[in-house]
């Protein structure tokens, strides 16, 4: 166990599996504490128990709802005695198919989760983090100040198909394309105040994501075999932990991860 994230408090949405679960483990392993969210309360409870007493707080619920988002920040304050200083916008879902072939009945829910939910969490994170630094959010940011004492991070999980739109998942990719734009705009807005906004763009990561998204096991499995070994959730979590462990004046603001042999997307 290292202590490079000692004292950090991270909110993680979508933490019951995949990247979110791996990241909760990675942060605690490095000395931090976490507030974890997902719809599946029993999965959160099991993860919190594994992470150890006093290291994790569970907030089950729909991450796209403002009341759940508010509960995440309030729970961090109550449990750990101060505000969270890292917010990982991870909750999301995939959808197989293009504009012309994907299941249209799932579009609204995917957009709500991947875009509107992410936007609400990013907005709340920006508001809380800015106010934790300066009670006057309209004030001018200086070269030195409270922001140098402790890093403050918003990390947004995007996707390689949000940058390189691919026909096999173009509806999903379009939601990540939009989230990338929001994250970069937010970085330009609150970065001058000392708050880092980082976009992580993973390519193929082996998890339950593919089955939930409805990818054909045979075709997509063959693709994964051809470019493998593919990324694992721990690979992405390790990268995020490294990014947020940097000194407050250092910012890895956009990171793309691919399996070495994945050429596209």
Image (cartoon, rainbow, N blue to C red):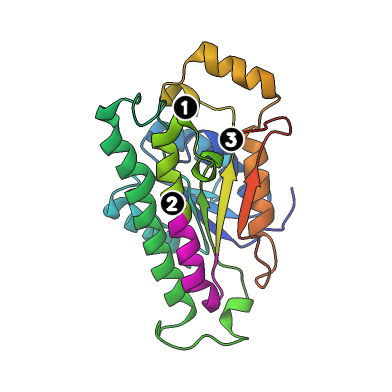
Q: Please state the horizontal and vertical placement of residue 171, each as a whole percent of the image.
A: 38, 35
Q: Nearer the viewer, residue 168 or 67?
A: 168
Q: Is residue 68 above or below residue 151?
A: above
Q: Is residue 225 left or right of residue 85?
A: right
Q: Earlier in the sequence, mark 2 or mark 3?
A: 2
Name the residue at 63% across, 77% down.
148
Name the residue at 28% across, 49% down.
65
For label 1, the residue is 168
Crowd class of label 3 (few under 14; some 14 to 19; many from 20; radius 10 Å): some
Q: Is residue 121 visible?
A: yes
Q: Please state the horizontal and vertical placement of residue 162, each as a whole percent of the image.
A: 49, 43
Cα separation between marks 3 and 1: 10 Å
Q: Is residue 91 visible?
A: no
For label 3, the residue is 265
Cα separation between marks 1 and 2: 19 Å
Most frequent secondary structure within the magenta stretch: helix
Region rendered in magenta: 181-196
Q: Please state the horizontal and vertical placement of residue 220, each as a whole percent of the image.
A: 54, 19
For label 2, the residue is 179
Q: Nearer the viewer, residue 217 or 89?
A: 217
Residue 170 falls within the magenta-colored stretch: no
Q: Which quarter of the rendered picture does the C terminus lie within?
A: top right
Cα separation between marks 2 and 3: 17 Å
Q: Is residue 210 above or below residue 134?
A: above
Name the residue at 41% across, 59% down.
122
Comparing marks 2 and 3, which lies closer to the viewer?
3
Do callouts 3 and 1 mark residues in contact (Cβ within 8 Å)?
no
Residue 193 falls within the magenta-colored stretch: yes
């Amino acid at each position: 166990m290292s202590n490079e994230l000692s004292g950090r408090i991270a909110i993680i949405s979508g933490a019951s599996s995949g990247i979110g679960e791996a990241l909760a483990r990675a942060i605690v392993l490095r000395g931090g504490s976490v507030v974890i969210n997902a719809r599946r309360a029993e999965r959160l409870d099991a993860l919190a128990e594994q992470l150890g007493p006093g290291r994790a707080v569970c907030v089950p619920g729909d991450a796209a709802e403002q009341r759940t988002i508010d509960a995440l920040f309030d729970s961090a304050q109550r449990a750990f005695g101060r505000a969270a200083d890292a917010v990982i916008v991870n909750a999301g879902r995939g959808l197989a198919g293009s504009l012309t072939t994907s299941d249209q009945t799932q579009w609204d829910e995917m957009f709500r989760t991947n875009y509107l939910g992410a936007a609400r969490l990013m907005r709340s994170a920006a508001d809380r983090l800015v106010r934790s630094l300066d009670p006057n959010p309209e004030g001018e940011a200086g070269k030195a100040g409270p922001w140098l004492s402790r890093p403050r991070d918003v990390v947004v999980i995007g996707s390689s198909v949000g940058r390189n739109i691919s026909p096999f998942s173009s509806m999903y990719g379009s939601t990540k394309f939009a989230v990338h734009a929001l994250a970069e705009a937010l970085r330009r807005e609150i970065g001058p105040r000392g708050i880092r906004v980082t976009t992580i763009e993973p390519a193929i990561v082996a998890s339950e994501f593919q089955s939930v998204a409805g990818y054909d096991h045979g075709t997509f499995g063959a693709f994964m075999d051809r470019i493998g070994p593919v990324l694992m959730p721990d690979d992405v979590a390790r990268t995020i932990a490294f990014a947020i462990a940097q000194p407050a004046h250092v910012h890895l603001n956009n990171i793309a991860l691919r399996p070495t042999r994945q050429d596209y997307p």
